Image (cartoon, helix red, strand yellow):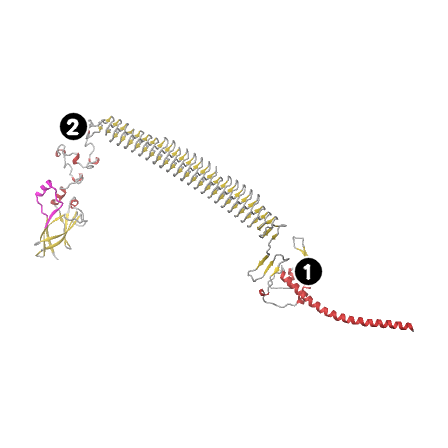
Amino acid sequence: MSTKHIAALVSVSVLLVIICKAQVPAMFNYQGKLVHGTNLVNAATTMVFRLYNTASGGDPLYIETQEVVVVDSLYSTHIGESPEVGSLANAVTNQPLFLELQIGDTTLSPREQVVSVLYAIKAGGVTAGAITQAMLADEAVTRPKIAPRAVSSAEIALGTVSYANIEDDTIRSNKIDWAWMPSGLQDGDDDSVLASYRESGAFGTTPSVSGVDSIAQGEGAVVAGDYAVVSGGKNNTASDTYGTVGGGAGNNAGYRATVGGGLQNLATAKYSAVLGGQYNSAKGEGSTVCGGGRNTNQAFYATISGGSENLIRPNSTNATIGGGAANHMWYDSARATIGGGGDNKIGGAEYATISGGRGNTVAQRAHYALISGGRDNEIQHYSDYAAIGGGSGNIIEESATNSTIGGGSGNNIDENAGNCVIAGGVDNQIGLGASFATVSGGRWNEAHADYSTVSGGSNNVVYTMANNASIGGGGGNVISIRSGHSTISGGRSNLIKSVTSYGTIGGGVGNVILTNCHYSTISGGAENQIGSNTHFAVIGGGWGNRVLGKYGTVPGGGFCKANGLYSLAAGKFAVADHSGSFVWGDGQNLHTTSSVANEVTFRCAGGARFLASTPTANRVTWDGGSSGWQNFSDQTAKEDFLPIDEVSVLERVVGLPITEWNYKGYSKRHIGPMAQDFHAAFPLAGSSDTSIDSGDLHGVALAAIQGLHAEVSDQKSDVGKLQEENRKLKHRVGQLEDLVRSLSKGGQQE
């Protein structure tokens, strides 16, 4: 649609008069003519009005949409009735100002510049600060144009005229008509001072000013120094040059000192300040008391932030008390800090800190020490860098540098115990001079040696010179003097006695490693003992076991003794008395004892078995009451049967060398074959040629006996035949003998 728009702003001169006499509506009239080609428009039409501070582009300062009734192409409306974006009053503060009109979807161009009438809105609604110095031309407002007393304080909004708005030397005391000032303001020239006045009437005590270029305001104010100020309040005093009191009552500021307010506060030292509160004193140069009550700051550039009855003594430069009550920073506590709490004390320790709590103390020359909180904790003299995290009644004694108590109650690190730690617990102790020792927690634990550790439990003790020794926990465990690098992991009432380096007790109850038993170990159990001078001994566990021989071992069991060097005793009542002996005792209440060195002795009333990999495989057993070993020979466990020639076996046995001999290193004599000869005669697969299986030996012997039996049987048959022949020959001989005798008798008769 082709639209032609004619619009004009109508200015009525009487409107300006109305602006001066009555409230100006925040709207303006807008009239125009709208045609469609050559046709007149008679319809309600959507119009959007926008105000800009540029002829083109930019963001709108004001937007309003209206349904405007158009009659015979003429319309009239008020802009400002229903703003959508911005306000009309703010928009008219801009110069120049342009109006843009949108009819339906069509925005007309160019924008129309707004002229004088619209700015009447601004003229009728001037607010404080609306007309600035930048809006007034130089010399536009001159003194002759302002009637006397036409501008009073009531006509000037607070903050409207600032120091920056007044040129130097514009207002001077000799330019003031003092006759119009309330009583109490003193006349004078450029060197006069300004005393306070009171609009509601005269002061009970007139302010007094005696310094040069000073100001005294408030009842009873006294300014006795040059360039000093009392801004208000009652009975405040600026007693020296550059002293300042902001307000309050009974306050006093000395040379270059400041009191902000409050009651009976005193700042007497150069650059000192009391900001508020009551009965506070800042007596050290540059010292500060921020507030609270009855706080005293006597140190250079120190600070008390608040609280009550806190004190910083001289020579505690840059010290700080954050608050709390009755906290004291004594002499020579430079840069130390008490954060708060009550009755805390730093007694001459530089850079020391007490964060809070009650009754905590850092003593003289414990520089950089720290108590984070808790109650009645103490770090004593010369314990630099020591720290107590909290808890109650914890103490780090003198010269325990870098030591720490994390918390708990009644814990103590003794003198000269540097770099030590008690993490917590109750009544734990690190002894005199025990550097780098640690007690992690528990109760009544003690560590007296360098690098020693008690991790927890109760009543555990590592004694002096047991360096690097450790007790893991449990109760009543003890590592004695000079048993360095020894360990008790836990359990109860275990003991490693003196001069036993690298001794170990894993746990259990009542286990003991006696004196001078280096590298010996009891893993656990109860009432086990390794005797004196028994190095490298081991008891694995059990009850009542003893090792008295070096390198001796009792794996476990009960009441066993490994008394010999390198001996081993196991089971029950086993006693290995000899060097290298191994004794096993079964469950009977009988002592089983070795008889010679390097002997293995077993007591096993139920017998003994040596088994192969499966229950049906070969095995060797010895049963109680047996006189020898029994070889497993069950037919069902055998296979691949082959017949043998017993006579051949006999012949090979007959040819087998049999000698008498003894094993090397032993005197006991034996009779038997050599394994090589045996295996040459009987080469059985899988057998070693350096040993003889007793089963094979038995088998060969039995086969040889069978071969011998066969030969003997044959010989026995032959012997029978010979015996029969012999019998017959004897019979015939007898007959011949009888015949001979008979013949012999007959010859004689003839």
Determine whether, in the image, residue 93 is placed left or right of residue 271: left
Residue 96: x, y in percent? 15, 45
**Extent of the magenta region:** 9-31
Q: Residue at x 57, y 60 (%)?
A: 612
* Number of dots carrying numbers: 2
Mark 1 is on which residue type? Ile
Above or below, comparing residue 285 to residue 728 in the picture = above
Mark 1 or mark 2: name the one nearer the start of the chain: 2
Mark 2 is on which residue type? Ala
Residue 271: x, y in percent? 31, 31
The answer to which quarter of the image holds residue 367 is top left
Residue 298 part of the magenta-drawn span: no
- Nearest the viewer among 212 and 254 is 254
Task: Say which mark, if any, is on residue 193.
Answer: none
- Nearest the viewer among 460 and 311 is 460
Residue identified by numbered label 2: 179
Crowding near pointer 1: few (<14 within 10 Å), some, many (20+)?
A: some
Q: Secondary structure at mark 1?
A: loop
Crowding near pointer 2: few (<14 within 10 Å), some, many (20+)?
A: few
Residue identified by numbered label 1: 658
Determine whether, in the image, residue 71 is placed left or right of residue 186: left
